[in-house]
Image (tube, rainbow, N blue to C red):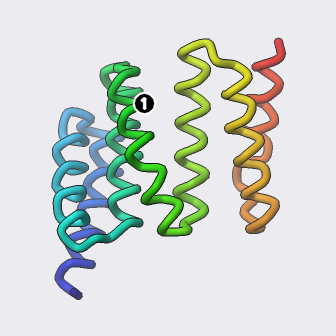
Amino acid sequence: MNKYLKFVEEKKRQIQDSVKNKPERQLEHCMNLLELATKYSDDLNIGYAYVWIADYYFYTVFDMGNTSKNLELAYPHIILSKDYELLINYYRLKGLEDEALGNYVDKVKCYLEILAIMKKTGIDDYYAICYGNITISFQ
């Protein structure tokens, strides 16, 4: 299992690096992580991989169909893993997707979910961003 955890951490580092420097490699790293996390039934890292796959489709190729599909696949794994920071990232990306599709009410619901999670958990990194995104939705 220790070897698995090292691999997971390395893949997460590679995903983060590829987002900044080599977006064409992001999908490959995510798929590697997804494959192994699925083999180990690791909900946290399955959810993580799907969120970053959705991120790739949203930011790199702007493919809303694949963005939606991967966010949908991520959600049950994130809920099972009970990782609130990953859930915040899920709702952040879901809100951006809703905005791109013109679903402003759904976007606001996503940011209200983020605010509720932050209040419940004490995570306070995104308050200003959430309120800013909600405000923009009403403009």
Q: Nearer the viewer, residue 85 or 47?
A: 47
From this view, report whether residue 121 is shown above or below residue 70: below
- Please, what secondary structure does the residue beneath circle 1 have? helix
Q: Nearer the viewer, residue 15 or 38?
A: 38
What quarter of the picture does the N terminus occupy? Answer: bottom left
Q: Nearer the viewer, residue 5 or 21?
A: 5
From this view, report whether residue 96 is shown above or below residue 62: below
Residue 116 position, x and y percent, is 78, 53
From this view, report whether residue 93 is shown above or below residue 2: above
Q: Name the residue tied to disc 1.
A: 68
Residue 92, image quadrant: top right
User: Which residue appears at 18% of the width and 40% of the height?
Assistant: 25
Residue 42 position, x and y percent, is 32, 70
User: Which residue appears at 74% of the width and 30% of the height?
Assistant: 108
Residue 3, image quadrant: bottom left
User: Which residue appears at 72% of the width and 63% of the height?
Assistant: 123
